[in-house]
Image (tube, helix red, strand yellow):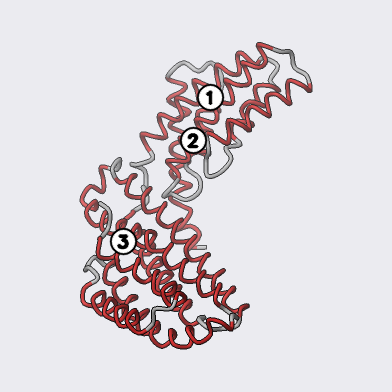
């Protein structure tokens, strides 16, 4: 229970305070009925992952506005009917695919149907729009100030997770070299999951760094957050090369024509993966790939001189691209 409260308590408190503030601001602005829609905005905007909540909030609030405008426009053109409902839903879902909010933005359809079902759609639309705008303004103002998520505390975990997934995927693919096809395919599935998780972490890291720009309370953390975000971005940039190695290993599994190449490659790739992983770990920590990258390049060069067969070239290529990316450094 303590863990749940520690995790969700700040979010619940932010929603509560922001909803009450949005309600009160709407009353001050002259609401002549309970301004429910102003209080609904924080429920929509501040839920979910705190690293992505602000971006999704803009998309969801935009969905409310788009849905209300769509519903009132259709009802001014056609009378309520099954055909009108079908038209509203089709247009709302099409807009939801454009105004995405972590996927299809269903808020457009929900808001348009609320207008469609209301006995006084014009009055409903007017109140919904201005109260939503008031609630959104309060939410955007208070969200960075009320118990904001601490990117400096969250990003080290993301960076470590990316490092472990990346190096584990590289080691696992080398271990699967020459294994039975079913094992190579299982490794490919695992590596694909790792790369998808790294991509998600990179999106969270970008959002965390962006949110910090709007948070005056944590200005002193910007340099460290930038360093950690670059580490996660670097892992995301390397992930496709690791995935390419897993695909090559899966493609060669069970093939008798390349079995001698795989037998020669495995001991070389074990050492190459170890030095490459060390270079990755150093680069993600901000130290630079250092001597480990030079050692990996020397191993690659020796392997190239010893075996020029096409399968060996295919197995070396992901390592070469990883080392090239590491030498290029993070994109600033």
Which residue carries the number 3 mark?
A: 231
**For this view, does 220 lie left or right of residue 39?**
left
Q: Residue at x 36, y 43 (%)?
A: 146
45 w.r.t. 242: above or below: above
Residue 288 is labelled as none
Residue 35 is marked as: 1
Q: Position of 25 compared to 85: left or right?
A: left
Q: Residue at x 44, y 57 (%)?
A: 199
Q: Give the image quarter of residue 151.
A: bottom left
The answer to which quarter of the image holds residue 71 is top right
Along the line of sight, which residue is nearer the eye, 124 or 26? Answer: 124
Comparing labels 2 and 3, the label whose residue is closer to the camera: 3
Q: Position of residue 285 (x, y in %)?
A: 27, 68
Q: Quick one: SS at disc 3?
A: helix
The residue shown at (34%, 82%) is 303
Q: Are marks 3 and 1 in contact (CB under 8 Å)?
A: no
Residue at 30% over, 83% down: 302
Q: Which residue is mark 2?
A: 59
Distance in Å between CA atoms under marks 2 and 3: 28 Å
Element on which disc 1 rests: loop
């Amino acid at each position: 229970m303590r863990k749940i409260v520690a995790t969700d308590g700040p979010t619940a408190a932010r929603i509560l305070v922001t909803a009450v503030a949005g309600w009160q601001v709407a009353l001050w602005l002259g609401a002549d009925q309970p301004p429910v829609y102003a209080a609904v905005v924080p429920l929509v905007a501040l839920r979910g992952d705190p690293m992505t909540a602000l971006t999704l909030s803009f998309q969801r609030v935009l969905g409310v506005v788009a849905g209300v405008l769509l519903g009132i426009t259709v009802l001014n053109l056609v009378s309520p009917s099954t055909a009108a409902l079908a038209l509203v839903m089709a247009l709302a879902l099409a807009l939801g695919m454009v105004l995405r909010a972590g996927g299809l933005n269903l808020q457009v359809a929900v808001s348009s149907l609320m207008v469609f079902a209301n006995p006084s759609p014009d009055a409903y639309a007017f109140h919904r729009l201005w109260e939503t705008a008031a609630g959104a303004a309060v939410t955007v103002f208070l969200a960075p100030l009320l118990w904001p998520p601490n990117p400096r505390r969250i990003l080290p975990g993301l960076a470590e997770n990316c490092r472990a997934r990346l190096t584990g995927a590289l080691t696992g693919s080398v271990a699967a070299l020459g294994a039975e096809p079913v094992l190579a395919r299982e490794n490919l599935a695992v590596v694909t999951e790792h790369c998808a998780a790294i991509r998600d972490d990179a999106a969270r890291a970008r959002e965390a760094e962006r949110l910090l720009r709007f948070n005056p309370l944590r200005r002193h953390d910007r340099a460290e957050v930038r360093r950690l975000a670059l580490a996660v971005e670097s892992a995301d940039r390397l992930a496709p090369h690791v995935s390419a190695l897993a695909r090559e290993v899966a493609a060669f599994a069970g093939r008798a024509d390349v079995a001698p190449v795989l037998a020669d490659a495995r001991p070389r790739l074990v050492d190459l993966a170890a030095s490459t992983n060390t270079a990755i770990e150093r680069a993600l920590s901000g130290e630079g790939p250092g001597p480990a990258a030079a050692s990996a390049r020397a191993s690659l060069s020796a392997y190239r001189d010893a075996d020029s067969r096409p399968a060996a070239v295919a197995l070396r290529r992901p390592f070469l691209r990883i080392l090239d990316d590491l030498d290029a450094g993070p994109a600033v």
